[in-house]
Image (spheres, rainbow, N blue to C red):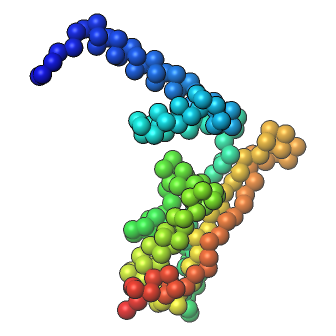
């Protein structure tokens, strides 16, 4: 080792980093609307960028927005009954029940928000290619992604309507396999 740090200096470095990180965590749990234009908010975003430790705790959301998700692909082959298959590629495995947080986050970010909508088309192209690759479906097959989302009602809505959540279905499609996966055609 080229140089040695004294114990007091090491302790000061640890104390300094711990204090900076504690301040960062304190600022990051505040609502973004409060911190986006402020100096601490800008410093916090810079710290997030440098350390790659994104914090989005949603601490001030009182009840979860999504109560339950059911995501599946509906496939309609010519001359065959419509049926459901999974949604995860490769292999088109069923959406996990109970839902795994990673898939819930992906569905929420990609299907319910426009910030990550650039992932929708590549995902549907992967699905089309995976369906064609199985050999079970001809290129004229129609498929769509159905996302059944149960949104949590407000406390007043729960009291008045006696329902915890209300269902809303979002559909992407229908698409023809050959339109999204032309290179995979036989």
Which residue is at a point 51% across and 60% down the rendered structure image?
95
Q: In the rendered view, does 161 fall on the left or right side of 64?
A: right
Q: Relative to 22, does residue 165 appear above or below in the rendering?
A: below
Q: In the rendered view, does 20 fall on the left or right side of 111?
A: left
Q: Relative to 30, does residue 184 appear above or below in the rendering?
A: below
Q: Residue furthest right?
A: 160
Q: Position of residue 2 (x, y in %)?
A: 12, 22
Q: Residue furthest left?
A: 1
- Viewer-proximal residue among 91 and 177: 177
Q: Residue furthest top?
A: 8
Q: How many marks?
A: 0
Which residue is at a point 29% across and 10% down the rendered structure image?
9
Q: Relative to 123, does residue 114 appear above or below in the rendering?
A: above
Q: Position of residue 154 (x, y in %)?
A: 79, 42
Q: In the rendered view, does 163 fall on the left or right side of 106?
A: right
Tell me if residue 99 can be seen.
no
Which residue is at a point 42% across and 78% down the rendered structure image?
129
Tell me if residue 172 can be seen.
yes
């Amino acid at each position: 080792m080229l140089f040695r740090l004294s114990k007091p200096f090491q302790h000061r470095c640890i104390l300094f980093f711990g204090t900076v990180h504690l301040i960062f965590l304190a600022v990051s749990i505040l609502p973004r609307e409060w911190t986006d234009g402020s100096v601490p908010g800008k410093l916090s975003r810079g710290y997030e960028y440098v350390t790659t430790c994104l914090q989005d705790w949603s601490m001030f959301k009182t009840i979860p927005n999504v109560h339950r998700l059911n995501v599946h692909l509906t496939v309609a082959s010519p001359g065959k009954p419509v049926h459901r298959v999974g949604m995860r590629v490769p292999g088109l495995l069923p959406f996990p029940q109970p839902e795994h947080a990673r898939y819930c986050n992906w569905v929420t970010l990609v299907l319910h928000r426009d910030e990550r909508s650039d992932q929708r088309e590549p995902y549907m192209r992967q699905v089309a290619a995976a369906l064609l690759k199985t050999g079970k479906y001809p290129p004229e097959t129609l498929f769509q992604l159905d996302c059944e989302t149960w949104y949590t009602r407000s406390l007043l809505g729960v009291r008045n309507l006696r329902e915890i959540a209300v269902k809303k279905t979002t559909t992407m499609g229908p698409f023809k396999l050959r339109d999204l996966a032309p290179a995979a055609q036989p």
